Amino acid sequence: MALAPPARGRAREGFDEVPTSPLRVYAADHQPIRLFAELEGITPAELVHRALAAYLDAHGQRLAEMTRQAQRLVEDRDLEGLAAFLAETRIARRAAREARLATLRRQPGAD
């Protein structure tokens, strides 16, 4: 999946200027994001943008299938099936979020 790189007040790499907005990230991630961006010679925004593109490359098919499944349930007007599907995905997302937070809490300096 090719996403245009974000701009930082000027056009970059031949792309038109792309608007940006603030993004909240965990405090423990600020320093690594800055470090990795500096090592790559890019802005922190570009690093996050590339990470999103990589995530979509890796998980895009699964996300597309989940979207198609939800769309089929809506088209079929299967409200019970849609509610069950959403509950399952909500439970899975909550479990994944709690696992990430637990990992972050175990990192030094993540008070």
Image (spheres, helix red, strand yellow):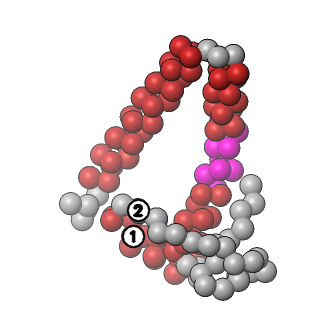
- Quadrant housing residue 26: bottom left
Residue 8 appears left or right of 34: right
Alpha carbons under labels 1 and 2: distance apart: 7 Å
Q: Residue furthest right?
A: 14
Q: Residues within 10 Å of mark 1 (few under 14, many from 20)?
A: few
Q: Residue furthest bottom?
A: 10
Q: Which quadrant holds the C terminus?
A: bottom left
92 up-or-down from 103: above or below: above
**Magenta includes 56?**
yes
Kindly identify the residue that appears in the image at 72 percent across and 68 percent down: 4
Residue 57 appears left or right of 34: right
Q: Estimate the x, y position of residue 3 in percent, counting from the top left.
A: 71, 62
Tell me which secondary structure the magenta stretch mostly adopts.
helix
Residue 30 badge: 1
Residue stretch in magenta: 54-62
The amino acid type, in three-letter code, at marker 1 is His
Q: Estimate the x, y position of residue 21 in percent, counting from the top left.
A: 52, 69
Task: Please give the residue where the numbered disc 2 appears in the rendered image.
Answer: 25
Mark 1 and mark 2 in contact? Answer it, CB < 8 Å: yes
